[in-house]
Amino acid sequence: MKQKIYLLLSSLLAIVLLTLLFQKIDTTTFWPTIRSFATGGKLSALLLCCYAYVAIQGLRFSILYPGKATLWQHIGLNFGNHSGNILIPGRMGEAVRPLYMKRWWPETKLKEVIKWAVVEKFAEFVSMVLFLGTGIAVWGTGATSTTLLPDNLPWSLVAFSVLLLAAGLWRKKKAPHMNRTEKILWAVALSYLTWLVNTLGVLAVTGDLRIAFALLVTMTLASAVPMLPAGLGAAQWAVVALSSFMHMAEGEAMAYSSALHLVWIFVRLSVGVPLLLFVWGWPKAREVQLVKENEV
């Protein structure tokens, strides 16, 4: 009941924020930008990158803590984590993975799963710092278009991403026998890969690497607001507020941030919700409480 009330109130708050913001901006550039998503395979490329992003995160944890779960189960659990963070208050979606692993294999030690989840967050932070450094070095030249960037840079990023993913899948076979240091290094590498894949998805719809980088970083940080479903509303305010620094009209910034955000939410829920509702069963309150106690 509490979860339903939270979801209702947070959704209403997000709608209010988006409505106020929509009334504030000039919509001249908003609708043309929205319509552009349906051209040139942009939406398909964005969806592919979004699904790959969440799947790679599942691969990352399967290297850190394989347990008895298969790679596909780890990927599904990661979709469940994201869905839980959208639908459950206080980002309690993080409890999805440990509680299901405990449910499936009672001998699983929750503290061990949670310990590696903390290591995973550390790897994400390190990779974010590395990604910010890459963005500043490559795209932070002050130019407002990609004319000063090599024409083949996007394809080089695609090739590098595919090779790194292939290496991660190959290395996954030896995950149980890796030492702690090697696991952490692979977690950082795969976390960095998720940033690249997400950037390529945003690039597919914007056509500009610098704008893609700026949008991704701004929306990711703003989406961390825990009282809104996936940060919906807060991310749009942040992007519109910084639109002049991105050399975009406010309507264009609103269109990009809203469309991208809704696609991100759809991708996570499209896999996570069916798994949690119809395949695995929705988390019970006592199970979530057990995970919270172990987290403490």
Image (spheres, rainbow, N blue to C red):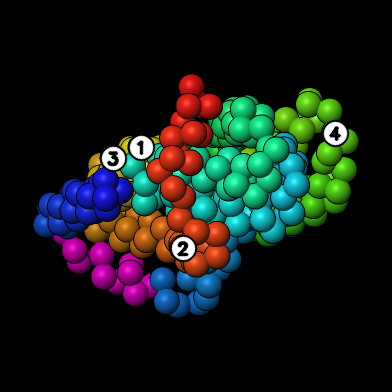
- Which marked residue is nearer to the observer: mark 2 or mark 3? 2
- Which marked residue is nearer to the observer: mark 2 or mark 1? 2
Residue type indicated by callout 1: Gly
Which residue is at the front of the view, 43 or 61? Answer: 61
Q: Which residue is drawn at 82% across and 41% down?
A: 175
Residue type indicated by callout 3: Met
User: Element type at marker 4?
Assistant: loop
From the image, tell me which residue sits under label 1. Answer: 90
Instruction: State which quadrant residue 70 falls in.
Output: bottom right
Mark 4 surroundings: few (<14), some (14-19) or many (≥20) residues within 10 A:
some
Mark 1 surroundings: few (<14), some (14-19) or many (≥20) residues within 10 A:
some
State if disc 1 and disc 3 touch (CB < 8 Å). Answer: no
Provide the residue span drawn in magenta: 25-36
User: Element type at marker 3?
Assistant: loop
Residue type indicated by callout 4: Met
From the image, tell me which residue sits under label 3. Answer: 227
Q: Estimate the spatial distance between the alpha carbons at disc 3 and disc 1, rounded to whole Å.
A: 7 Å
In magenta stretch: residue 35: yes
Q: Residue at x 30, y 71 (%)?
A: 32
State if disc 1 and disc 2 touch (CB < 8 Å). Answer: no
- Residue 146, image x, y percentages: 52, 53
From the image, tell me which residue sits under label 4. Answer: 178
User: Element type at marker 2?
Assistant: helix
Instruction: State which quadrant residue 190 falls in.
Output: top right
Q: Is residue 15 left or right of residue 146?
A: left
Q: Is residue 2 above or below residue 117?
A: below
Which residue is at the front of the view, 205 or 271? Answer: 271
Q: Estimate the spatial distance between the alpha carbons at disc 4 and disc 1, rounded to whole Å.
A: 33 Å
